[in-house]
Image (cartoon, helix red, strand yellow):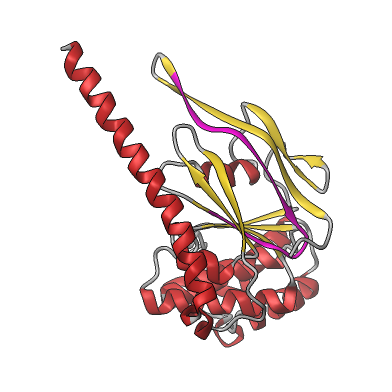
Amino acid sequence: MLAGQVVLEVQDLDVVFPAGRTTFTALKDVSFEVRESEIVILVGPSGCGKSTLLNTAAGLIAPSDGGILVDGEPVVGPGRDRGMVFQAYTLFPWLRVQENVEYGMRLNKVRREGRRRVAGHYLGLVGLLDARDRYPYQLSGGMRQRVAIARALANEPRVLLMDEPFGALDAQTRVLMQQLLLDVWERSRMTILFVTHDIEEAVFLGDRVYVMDVNPGRITTEIAVDIARPRKLDVIATEEFQSLRRQIFELIRREHAWAEELVIDELKSVSDDL
């Protein structure tokens, strides 16, 4: 699925962090696009910079070189054009569900009746209208993450950034949340950039999957997921799905093996110097 204009564009992105007397290159020469109404997935081994890339897109980390554009405008900090959903639920425990969803609109001076209408719409999309008066501690983990998604959508961002949003959930709830996200996407056609370490989740949700590797973090492979939508859970059993899963697994497995060899070589080098 490549129809539609480019919403988010990553251009020759480098992110370098100080590390004592030296530096650590988290991302190097990363470039890709996310088009309108796409779900684009980032996968790769631990330490490849997936979350760093998403946080840079959110404006929480400044690029060292290159940049990120949303609708052609450079990202220079957090903004309403990007919504963020983290693995942690990040709800305000002293606010009720409805108030949590309305929070961003309150900051933007949206009138009360408008806030309630928009919040009600998105709580309906995630199936939580009946829970609007509860506090977060009264909700399950899956329900809290549904509130977080509704809150992000309520601000009507151009792109939704999701950093392993289902990673803290049990296996059954995680699968239900994946299906819920696809159902919400079918109705909203939101543009999504999604980070996960779960290959099956990547194939089930994504239109395209970018595979990253480490030292430094960069994109090595783009894989189109040409599985028809709407998707239901039974698609996981198909040979088409499993073939894509195996392809991505093998790419990441080879990268893990390369990273392990690098660490062993570095340890040997240190040992020889002692």
**x and y, in percent, of residue 105 in the image:** 73, 62
Task: Judge left or right: residue 121 versus residue 4.
Answer: left
Residue at (60%, 65%) from the top-left corner?
206
Give the number of marks. Answer: 0
Residue at (59%, 36%) from the top-left corner?
61
Residue at (54%, 71%) from the top-left corner?
204
Q: Quadrant of residue 123?
A: bottom right
Image position of 98 with respect to 261: above or below: below
Residue at (68%, 39%) from the top-left corner?
77
Q: Foreground: 112 or 261?
A: 261
Magenta stretch contains residue 250: no
Which residue occupies the extreme bottom position in the image? Answer: 130
Q: Bounds of the magenta span?
A: 23-42
Q: Quadrant of residue 173?
A: bottom left
- Whether residue 37 can be seen here: yes
- Whether residue 94 can be seen here: no
**x and y, in percent, of residue 34 in the image:** 71, 54
**x and y, in percent, of residue 273 in the image:** 20, 11
Magenta stretch contains residue 36: yes
State the predominant SS element of the stretch in magenta. strand
**x and y, in percent, of residue 68 in the image:** 71, 40
Image position of 256 with respect to 194: above or below: above
Image position of 170 with respect to 90: above or below: below
Q: Quadrant of residue 37?
A: bottom right
Look at the image and tell me in which quarter the N terminus lies: bottom right
Look at the image and tell me in which quarter the C terminus lies: top left
